[in-house]
Image (spheres, rainbow, N blue to C red):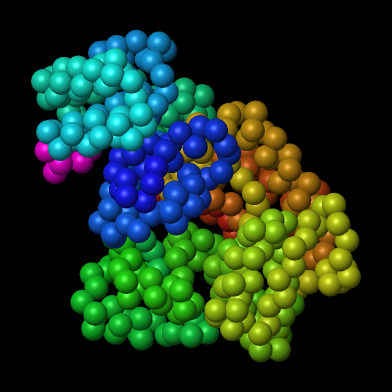
Amino acid sequence: MTLKEHNIRAIAASVLLQNQKNDKYLQDILEEELIKFHLSIKDKQLLFHIVLGLTRNHILLETILSEFFNLKKTKERLKIILKIAVYQVIFLDKIPDYAITSSMMQTADIFKMKKQQKSFLRAILSKFMKEKDKYSLNNDFINSLSLAKKYSYPDWLIDHFKNEMTSTKLEEVLIAGNSNPPVWIFPVPQKLEEQELKDILDNNKINYLFDDRTKSFTLKNLNKKLKEMLNEGDIMIQSPHQKQAISQCPAIPDDIVLEIGAAPGGKTVHLSKMVGVNGKVFSLDNSAFRIQLLKERIEKTNLKNVTPLLHDIVTEKNDSISKTFDHIILDAPCSNLGELCRRPEVRWNINENDILSLSQKQKILANTAVSFLKDGGTFLYITCTISTQENQVIKEYLIIKHNLKLIKDELILPSKKIPTGSYFALLKKSF
């Protein structure tokens, strides 16, 4: 596609095709694609809605389309274009049917589809439009489907969740995983006070909700003013659960803290404030790309007491972390099952064996990390998954393996109010 071909549906189709060919996060592919085009805020929002929404509802859309033709005998590009069309009809009802059909035919032209394929596309769209009421949400057809098809989750993941929670909570978690999450922002404490941010939002007539418990500001999206503040490092985007988890660390001024899995730096900002000017935070990540993001955050927010390190504590040695620490925070690599609303592709990219494999890696990483903890120090284990195997199992392992004392732990399941989930466990090492 060229810059003049600003067909949002074509860009969406391109992103979805790329997502099938590599293991990058879908959001990263979207951001890379956006660099090529000068889109308005409205067009960007539509692009994200289509790409993320279609990924969330992949099985449901294919179930509906299978009523009209044989998916197995249809080329992937054509299937994606049809799924984009059906998604818009069902989930974006403000777009007229004729506009959807027209834009999808333009998309077919951009992808240089053959005449026969375009005739097939037009015929299927025409037939679907005539019968679309049958497939409206909460109609008999949709409600008769299994949970896996209705909410678009792999069968194994539905079974996994059934073993983790009650049936009532299960459906709430599935719905939360398919929702469009809001944007949660926090003032960077080194640069902006909470009341100052409230004043800025009020003065610029920006609608927001403030949660006094989590101290989070909830918005539908970022406008130009807030994007400028984000780029300047005055505010940061962070899940309320991540903020809640890092607040459990009992670090005080002058403490020395080791943070593992630090990038992109949201937790680092809070830790830097906790330990004060004479404290020190060593922030580690084993990804060169992510450590660069962390360095940019440190520079923007002017964190003088933070040392970023590209380092893998399991396989490498570093003199900076040969000593012991007052507190250690491990934000462990996980399955991201608490972040399905933000990372919908995860459900299609992992399986039960991956969770077991991740659990073993988490044990190794946590076991190594605890070895750097002072007697009487605390270890804070954090994930953004809701899987027992990656959470409570690791907590119990550390308690037994290192004779740690549990101070507090909490599993937060995704809900209608906050559609992300997470876990933390705060443990203490005996003297």
**Which stretch did the figure color magenta?**
91-96
> In the rendered view, does 130 fall on the left or right side of 334?
left
Depth check, front residue: 23 or 340 = 23
> In the rendered view, does 379 fall on the left or right side of 140?
right
Q: Quadrant of the N terminus?
A: top left
Quadrant of res 270: bottom right
Rendered view: 71 above or below 368: above
Depth check, front residue: 285 or 397 = 285
> In the rendered view, does 393 fall on the left or right side of 86?
right
| Whole-percent x, y for residue 30 in the image | 44, 49
Q: Residue at x 14, y 24 (%)?
A: 129
Q: Residue at x 29, y 44 (%)?
A: 7
Asked if the magenta segment contains residue 94, the reply would be yes
In this orientation, does residue 181 appear?
Answer: no
Q: Quadrant of the C terminus?
A: bottom right
Rendered view: 326 above or below 427: below
Q: Residue at x 59, y 59 (%)?
A: 408
